[in-house]
Amino acid sequence: MAVTAEQELLERAPFVAALEEAFGDVRTGVGRLVLVPGEAGIGKTALVQRFCAEHPDDARLLWGACDGLHTPRPLGPFVDIALATGDPLEEIVDRGDKPQAVFAALRDELNAKKPTIVVLEDVHWADEATLDILRLLGRRIEAVEALVIATYRDDELDRTHPLRIVVGELATTAGMRRIELPALSLDAVSELAAPHGVDPEELYGKTAGNPFFVTEALATGMTDVPPTIRDAVLARAARLGPDARALLDAVAVVPQRVELSLLEILAGGSLTELDECLASGILRHEDHSIAFRHELARLAVEESINPHRRLALHRQALAVLEDPPSGTLDLARLAHHAEAAGDADAVLQYAAAAGARAASLGAHREAAAQYARALRFADDLGLHAKVELLERRSYECYLTDQSDEAIASLERALEIYRELGDHRKEGVALCALSRRMWCGDRIREAEDVVQRAIEVLEQLPPGPELGMAYSSAASFCMNVEDVDGALSWGTRALELGEQLGDTEILVHSLNNVGTMEVLAGRPGGREKLERSLALAEEAGLDDHVGRAYIHFGWAMTRTRTYPLQDRLDAGLEFCGERGLDLWWLYMLAYRARGELDQGHWDEAVDSAAFVLRQRRDAYMLRILGLVVLALVRARRGDPDIWSPLDEALALGQPSGDLQHLAPVVAARAEAAWLEGRADTVAEATQAVFELAVRRESPWVAGELAYWRWQAGIREEVPSCAAAPYALQIAGDWVGAADLWTEIGCPYEAALALADGDDEETLRRAHDELQHLGAQPAAAIVARRLRERGAHVPRGPQSATRENPANLTRRELEVLGLVAEGLRNSEIAERLFLSEKTVDHHVSAILRKLEVRTRGEASAEAVRLGLAGQDR
């Protein structure tokens, strides 16, 4: 499919810019040859199509391709070009004249009609005459007023390939440029995967970022090797001789890489055909091992192997790996080959051990997969051994936010405990199931399950299991912000934990009680949370450490206590190092909210967007990200505010609790007020406002009371309302603004000033909102100023008059660096942003300036006086 000028190619802007630079030289009368090497599927053609689509009217395009025939057609690409140009070039090519004559005719043709873009595609398949012309073009390119672009697969060039010789000869030619396309980064793959609900890390692992493999895998939902990929890989494999293909099969049954010593055994003692396999571009050599370039290619070849031969190869690999020269077993590889060989005993032995090993290293997703592998072969396993596997699988799924699998495994474990009559273990499993159900947003079921756990365990002598059941009940109440319930159950858990000297009960219950007290504005809460964290760290309870850091993040954003940011930063590092993915994402979501509240809106969008790209079971994560994204859009006056808010509301409504609903409802109230639809605020906030007052939640009740007051609703201010909101509603806008400034919330401080009763204060509010880029709120304040008879220029303010394209401050920074000639990667390094973020800013700049290229953007910036503007 051809790429159009409107389509965005991720992480390819610098390479399009390099082609633009070369074309700029051609326009000055100096020809350029640009070589574009890269593996199959890396996007060479897409890049060239994207560049050519930028020049439909200001350049002639001549496109010729070489064909992958066993015997290439002579002058293949120039036959295509001659058909487009006609005589005299067509006549000379048809006649089969020597390369020198074809080159001379081509040179005359190019110099007669200029400028011209010539594309020679897939020259790794070129015949010798075509390569001779390419050599002549390269040597004399500066005298030819054309941009010649030659693409080829560098992974198919062995040491003696004729093209390698040509490229080497041209390496020092003045007019030659080289553009090497890298694979897509994990960030880019994540962006492509986001709309498809596909795990980006798994997709990246299977495709190594190859754009063709990525897009084809997404088109089939990652359920199997896409037919297009299978066909492409097997077509290349079909060119190998029989012995080389047999060797390729041996490599294919070993994931990631195969050591030469192992491959020699699998191949029957001979590696003589290895050079042919490497020259095909399917395999690569690294250190003392061989691997496929892409996991999907390996899978395509493995699936094509005769089942009996595949089984024999896996059994052979299993036997060799069970007796490694080093003496150290590679448990994960053994489990893989055991499963493929159908050896149930070996699977149970190695997969369970591999799962335990992965869990100990913090590789929790891999641990969950290994336990699932063992369970597939556990039909004849004893009940005690099976239930242990189920509980381990459930726990690892819980840590990696695979809620449905975590719940299903634990429910199967519960059935076994009931069958065994083990009520103590049944109670423990019920407590764990309650936590799994909460994380899976099955909130009412979670409440019922924890009560059943308490009923079961209270029939037994008090023990640590009952203490954890009490603490689990406190956790449930804390999450729904039932203060009395959380403190009551938490106190019972603490008393039993102290009596038994059980550290885990103390850690868990101190966390619950401390978090609840912080959220409710009660003294002593932070100290309890700090003690919980310290005890968990001392005892090596990693998941409890992560849980404490999450609740510091929740407390920080709910109560606007930004000195807790150091706890959030430490938590991100801790959980990232230990593979606690779910905890890490929660903290990133809270960081996004903190960045929003403290006026760092670009950073907030980046953090929230990352969270939203991760397809997870936990609704709360997505709600937090959607709210941040929508609020930035609403405050800036950007489009598409309500689709994220509608999705967040749909996700939060079934829970009925403040944690899920409060941020959504407050954001919807603010967005409606900014749009001048204050009449909708009362109905939108009523139910959650009443719940917040009943729960005595200071910050939720205060924020919703404030937006209802802004909407013209005059009612009694809740006695529990947080101080900044209570002051503002009471008319003390000076006190409210001072308090918001002290807290570190510039937007809220400006809104407080906006309720002032004198022109100077309103102008301060207006200036601060303009500085933040909060145009809708600034417009509201401007109207208030005009109503007082103050002069406020209509239309853009001074900053905007100097910036008629309405670029944001960040976009102005990026544009200035684009005008300096920096590439996106260099801009990203200069501004401490990701390259993906810079790509988005550049796209927005091109759209706002109504231009198509970076060069045109730079010229337009000069025309509008934006270049060199103080950034």
Image (spheres, rainbow, N blue to C red):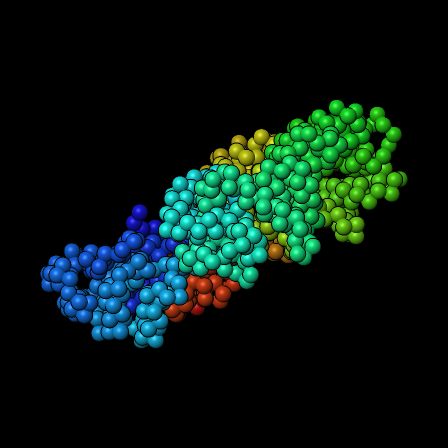
Q: Nearer the viewer, residue 693 or 140?
A: 140
**In this rendering, would 330 be left or right of 746?**
right
Q: Residue at x 18, y 70 (%)?
A: 100
**Label tally:** 0
The part of the image, by quadrant, that contains residue 452 is top right
Residue 30: tell me if it is visible. Answer: no
Q: Residue at x 55, y 42 (%)?
A: 312
Percent of width and height locating residue 175? 30, 73
**In this rendering, would 259 be left or right of 236?**
right
On screen, 735 above or below 414?
below
Percent of width and height locating residue 244? 44, 52
Q: Nearer the viewer, residue 397 or 336?
A: 336
Q: Quadrant of the C terminus?
A: bottom left
Q: Residue at x 24, y 74 (%)?
A: 140
Percent of width and height locating residue 158? 39, 63
Residue 228: tell me if it is visible. Answer: yes
Percent of width and height locating residue 39? 40, 57
The part of the image, by quadrant, that contains residue 470 is top right
Q: Nearer the viewer, residue 863 or 57?
A: 57
Q: Residue furthest front?
A: 269
On screen, 231 above or below 427?
below
Q: Residue furthest right?
A: 499
Q: Residue at x 79, y 50 (%)?
A: 539
**In this rendering, would 573 be left or right of 431?**
left
